[in-house]
Image: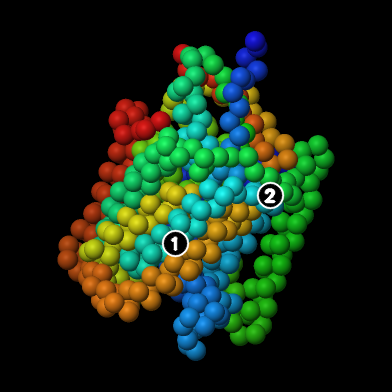
């Protein structure tokens, strides 16, 4: 498996800050170290939220993109 | 041309720096007070709620000022339109449909925002930012309530995600988003909206309502600043307990200090009445109101400012919040007046009358510096962060 394939996708479209970040944190906690989670969100605030989350927790944003108002992130759990 | 393209990118491609936004918000608030009255969202919300209640015949209010003439309502309309214009100009506008659980939280949060704002005699903008700037003890009282409320609201959200995950299930449609493969027409629509707002303000002036036009434009400026920076007072109160990030807390503390300096100059130089924005809610009103408002803003994901500008950028959850904020404010005021509790919310304390001008200024600066220092210490130590 390459780093950009995520076994788990969290669809947080329609959810407003802070729910996407809390859900992501919960999923990462349950994942094994190094595992990758895909997050989909429609709240533009999620971008800055995730950057703060990355700074604070050490989990890494591997990829980010946006299409049709949906932001997609791949986040790797800290070791 | 390249220089202009770079400036355009800084304004509408990248988010504005949060500290810059905080300074701008404080400056606009001082200008607004110098012009007439400080910024608050709750006065306009109550005006809208009173119109809804009068519309269905629940109350009779022949004295009620029309929403297009009330200064509070025009400020809110401006913030709404400014949030929309900021989103359009940066091609970020889209109608983001909310799942049912989010709509319920948005509506309930809105009712709590309305109730809390009436208890504290102002929302987090009028009752905390502007009241503290006006050297009213009630502003600092509301701050305590807001900290506790944001903490409790966050604990509730964490509980809900653990025990009732279905209530915050995602997957919803996004309508009208800008296409990423070709240039969007949204910036043009944003520019036209701004032009329309400017013409509306001029039309107010021509009909002898120049102040109303100015209030609208003040609101637009605030809406654009908030949308482009995503400076967020909910984050300022909540984030130390969540990820521990302290950026918005430091920015909010700076905004309060700068706004306080401006208000103090206006009052000290007798350009404004010293009793202005010093409300009789120092006591249970500010504390309980801050607590209720703090829970509400965390559930809704938006405060007196954030609920409105986020509604403007197309977030459907916040549409429910704004409607219920207005209704909640009107209903809460009816109950408070009807029960006589309105007279028992607290006392009006103008801090310089108790501790002198320098003492009052020092108190506000020390409290804000302590808040920012706590957030910075916690950012590194993560002692209070849940995530």
Q: Quadrant of residue A40?
A: top right
Pinpoint residue A4: horizontal percent, then vertical percent: 65, 18
Residue drawn at the location 64% of the way across and 49% of the way down: B97
Q: Are marks 2 and 1 on the same chain?
A: yes
Pinpoint residue B94: horizontal percent, then vertical percent: 68, 49
Up the image or down, A55 lies above or below B301; here it is above
Question: Which sits earlier in the primary sequence, circle 2 or circle 1?
Answer: 2
Residue toward you, B225 or B356: B225
Pinpoint residue A15: horizontal percent, then vertical percent: 56, 43
Please rate how many residues cluster around mark 1, counting C-alpha atoms within 10 Å: few if below 14, some from 14 to 19, many from 20: many
Q: Is residue B20 left or right of residue B198?
A: left
Q: Please, which chain is the residue tagged with disc 1 on?
A: B
Residue toward you, A39 or B39: A39
Q: Quadrant of residue B218?
A: bottom right
Tag 1, which secondary structure?
A: helix
Residue toward you, A7 or B371: A7
Residue drawn at the location 64% of the way across and 73% of the way down: B201
Residue drawn at the location 30% of the way across and 71% of the way down: B279
Q: Is residue B319 left or right of residue B329?
A: right
Tag 2, which secondary structure?
A: loop
Q: Mark on residue B111? A: 1
Q: Count of labels shown?
A: 2
Q: Is residue A45 visible?
A: no
Q: Please, which chain is the residue tagged with disc 2 on?
A: B
Instruction: Check the image and name the residue furthest to the top.
Output: A1
Q: Say which quadrant the N terminus of chain A sits in.
A: top right
Per the model, the C-alpha gap separating discs 2 and 1 is 25 Å
Q: Mark on residue B336? A: none
Instruction: Check the image and name the residue furthest to the left.
Output: B354
Pinpoint residue B355: horizontal percent, then vertical percent: 17, 62
Residue toward you, B84 or B321: B321
In this figure, which residue is indicated by the disc labeled 2? B94
């Amino acid at each position: 498996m390459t780093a950009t394939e995520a076994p788990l996708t969290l669809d947080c479209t329609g959810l407003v800050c802070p729910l996407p970040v809390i859900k992501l944190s919960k999923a990462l906690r349950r994942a094994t170290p190094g595992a990758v989670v895909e997050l989909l969100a429609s709240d533009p605030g999620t971008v800055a939220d995730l950057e703060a989350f990355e700074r604070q927790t050490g989990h890494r944003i591997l990829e980010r993109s946006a299409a049709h108002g949906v932001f997609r992130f791949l986040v790797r759990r800290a070791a | 041309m390249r220089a202009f393209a770079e400036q355009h990118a800084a304004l509408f491609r990248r988010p504005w720096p949060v500290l810059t936004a905080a300074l701008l918000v404080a400056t606009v608030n001082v200008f607004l007070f110098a012009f007439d009255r400080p910024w608050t969202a709750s006065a306009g919300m109550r005006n809208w709620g009173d119109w809804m209640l009068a519309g269905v015949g629940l109350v009779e209010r022949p004295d009620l000022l029309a929403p297009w003439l009330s200064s509070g309502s025009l400020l809110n309309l401006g913030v709404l339109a400014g949030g929309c214009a900021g989103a359009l100009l940066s091609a970020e506008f889209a109608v983001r449909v909310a799942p049912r659980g989010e709509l319920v939280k948005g509506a309930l949060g809105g009712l709590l925002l309305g109730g809390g704002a009436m208890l504290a005699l102002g929302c987090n903008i009028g009752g905390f930012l502007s009241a503290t700037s006006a050297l009213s003890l009630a502003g600092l009282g509301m701050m305590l309530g807001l900290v506790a409320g944001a903490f409790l609201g966050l604990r509730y959200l964490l509980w809900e995600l653990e025990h009732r995950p279905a209530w915050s299930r995602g997957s919803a449609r996004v309508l009208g988003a800008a296409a990423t493969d070709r240039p969007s027409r949204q910036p043009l629509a944003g520019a036209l909206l701004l032009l329309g707002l400017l013409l509306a303000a001029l039309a107010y002036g021509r009909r002898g309502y120049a102040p109303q036009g100015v209030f609208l434009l003040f609101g637009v400026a605030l809406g654009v600043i908030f949308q482009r920076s995503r400076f967020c007072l909910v984050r300022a109160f909540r984030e130390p307990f969540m990820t521990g990030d302290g950026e918005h807390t430091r920015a909010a503390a700076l905004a309060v200090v700068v706004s306080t300096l401006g208000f103090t100059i206006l009052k000290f130089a007798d350009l404004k009445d010293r009793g202005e924005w010093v409300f009789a809610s120092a006591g249970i009103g500010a504390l309980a109101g801050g607590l209720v408002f703090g829970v509400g803003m965390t559930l809704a994901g938006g405060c007196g400012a954030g609920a409105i500008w986020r509604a403007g950028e197309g977030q459907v959850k916040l549409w429910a919040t704004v409607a219920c904020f207005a209704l909640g404010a009107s209903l809460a005021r009816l109950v408070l007046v009807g029960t006589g509790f309105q007279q028992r919310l607290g006392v009006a304390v103008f801090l310089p009358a108790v501790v002198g001008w320098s003492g009052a200024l020092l108190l506000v600066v020390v409290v804000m510096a302590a808040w920012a220092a706590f957030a910075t210490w916690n950012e590194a130590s993560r002692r209070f962060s849940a995530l």
